[in-house]
Amino acid sequence: MNKVVQELKKVKIFYIATVEGDQPRVRPFSTVAEFEDKAYICCGNHKEIYKQLSKNPLLELSGMYDGGTWLRVTARAVQDDRIEAQEAVLADPTGPRQLYRAGDGRFVVFRLEDVVALKYNFYAAPERIEE
């Protein structure tokens, strides 16, 4: 399994930061899935995050583990319009299947590319998490 997906599932709730003009925007997320060995996130195309990622696909995700360790992931979001990718995200236990259906025209999935994931704590150098 993709180790970045595993780590994001361990933190359960993570925050995604995007940019809107020169203003950072942050919101909580819990959906992360693996498809074709890559990490995927999702949203609706009516949401502000979709508009922001469409203009600037760079993002950061951050979440806290129990015990004072945290995860930071930087990536580039690449929209994947394949129904198979949407179905994989919806099939994941974290998927928003109560809100969307694959191919409904609103549900959008993004593959995370150029991923750099680091696990931090207060007592040691960051640990790099490889995909």
Image (cartoon, rainbow, N blue to C red):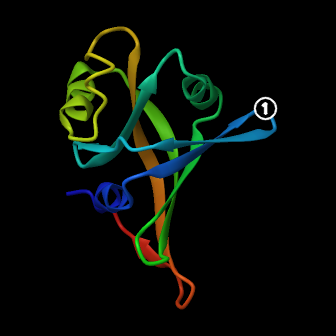
Q: Quadrant of residue 48?
A: top right
Establish if 58 lies above or below 96: below
Amino acid type shown at disc 1:
Gly
Q: Position of residue 103 (x, y in %)?
A: 28, 12
Residue visible at 25% across and 25% down?
A: 97
Q: Quarter of the image containing the N terminus?
A: bottom left
Outermost residue to the right: 22
At mark 1, the secondary structure is: loop
Question: Observer-nearest residue: 85 or 32?
Answer: 32
Question: In the drawing, does residue 23 fall left or right of residue 118?
Answer: right
Residue visible at 28% across and 34% down?
A: 95
Count of numbered marks? 1
Outermost residue to the top: 105
Are there few (<14), some (14-19), or many (20+) residues within 10 Å of tag 1? few
Q: Position of residue 16 (x, y in %)?
A: 54, 45
Q: Quarter of the image containing the C terminus?
A: bottom left
Q: Position of residue 101 (x, y in %)?
A: 26, 16
Q: Which residue position holds label 1?
A: 21
Establish if 5 lies above or below 77: below
Establish if 20 lies above or below 108: below
Question: Observer-nearest residue: 6 or 97?
Answer: 97
Q: Quadrant of residue 22?
A: top right
Residue visible at 35% across and 59% down?
A: 4
